[in-house]
Image (cartoon, rainbow, N blue to C red):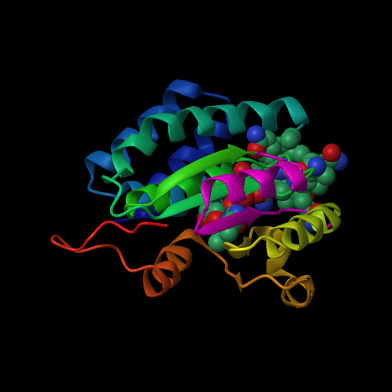
Amino acid sequence: MDVGAHRRAYLEALQARDVAAARRAVDAALAAGVSVADVYLEILQPALYEIGRGWAVGDHDVAHEHSATAVTQSLLGTLGPRMRALPTGGRLAIVTGSPEERHALGVQMVADFLEGDGWEVLNLGASTPAADLARLADAERADVVALSTSTPAGLPGAAEAVAELRALDPRPLVVLGGQLWSGEARRDAEALGADLVLDGPRELVARLRERFPPLQPGDEERSG
Ligand code: B12
């Protein structure tokens, strides 16, 4: 199956600001057997990266970017429920953009992948202040806090959030991800004291399965 053809159809629809064609491109991919996870990672994400590239070089203006983002966000709203699995055994993750971080679609994708693997998820969307995030993680006894950061300007906020979360007792596993860390900032991420710095939601799900194995039928509910 050629996911590339569906990706191109989706991107062309975004570039033409043709919302109906964008939805049709996703429907066609699903009808051809592309999984929802692959629609996220192989169609929607690369199309947005390309829109971002076009924006950076002046091919698209902000209104065009906003329309592509809004279409994609609405598609996530319909696709997300198809990923969901029943929560298995009280594993709670909080997913959010780091303080001052306005990019929210990656947050949503990460949240949906975790729900797809049986995690209970509190998705706080973009930009949660560090103190409020830590208070919530403490009150909910979250097992994991996954923080998303896209741009270098987000580094101080991410650092503040990691520091607040690390001060909790008991403290959640703190995972950093997002485009900021794919560059030179990767070194900073480790210095901040995060437990994990990961590239994508598939890797996140796999690593969390090692640390928090889903309960098997007959296992007792976790109490914590
Ligand atoms: C849409 C968009 C916006 C929208 C966001 C709206 C919204 N509701 O989300 C708005 C207009 C708000 C915006 C603002 C800005 N943006 Co912007 N934006 C984008 C764009 C086009 C798409 C973002 C997106 O949704 N990508 C798709 C998602 C699914 O990808 P993702 O975030 O990478 O997430 C995936 C992985 O990274 C990973 N992941 C993400 N988080 C986490 C967390 C964990 C724990 C794990 C494990 C994995 C993980 O999993 C996700 C799924 O695979 C990107 C282009 C791009 N390359 O992404 C630019 C881009 C990110 N923006 C950019 C810039 C410069 C800005 C602004 C600074 C512009 C400005 N001058 O104001 C501001 C910053 C605002 C802020 N304080 O955050 C640059 C960043 C470049 C850089 N290195 O600094 C980009 C790359 C565009 C470009 N080519 O120049 N933006």
x, y percentage for residue 220? Answer: 22, 60
Question: Within the magenta stretch, is there residue 140?
Answer: yes
Quadrant of the image occupied by residue 192: bottom right
Q: Is residue 136 above or below residue 152?
A: above
Q: Nearer the viewer, residue 170 or 154?
A: 170
- Tell me if residue 53 can be seen: no
- Tell me if residue 144 can be seen: yes
Which residue is pictured at 33% across the width and 35% down the height? Answer: 81
Q: Nearer the viewer, residue 222 or 198?
A: 222
Quadrant containing the N terminus is bottom left
Q: Is residue 151 above or below residue 171?
A: above
Q: How many marks?
A: 0
Question: Within the magenta stretch, is there residue 211?
Answer: no
x, y percentage for residue 77? Answer: 44, 30
Which residue is pictured at 30% across the width and 55% down the height? Answer: 89
Quadrant containing the C terminus is bottom left
The part of the chain drawn in magenta is: 126-152
Which residue is pictured at 45% across the width and 45% down the height? Answer: 121
x, y percentage for residue 80? Answer: 38, 38
Q: Nearer the viewer, residue 72 or 141?
A: 141
Q: Among all residues in the image, which is located at the extreme left?
A: 218
Q: Is residue 121 above or below residue 224?
A: above
x, y percentage for residue 93? Answer: 49, 52
Quadrant of the image occupied by residue 65: top right
Quadrant of the image occupied by residue 206: bottom left
Q: Is residue 20 above or below residue 104?
A: above
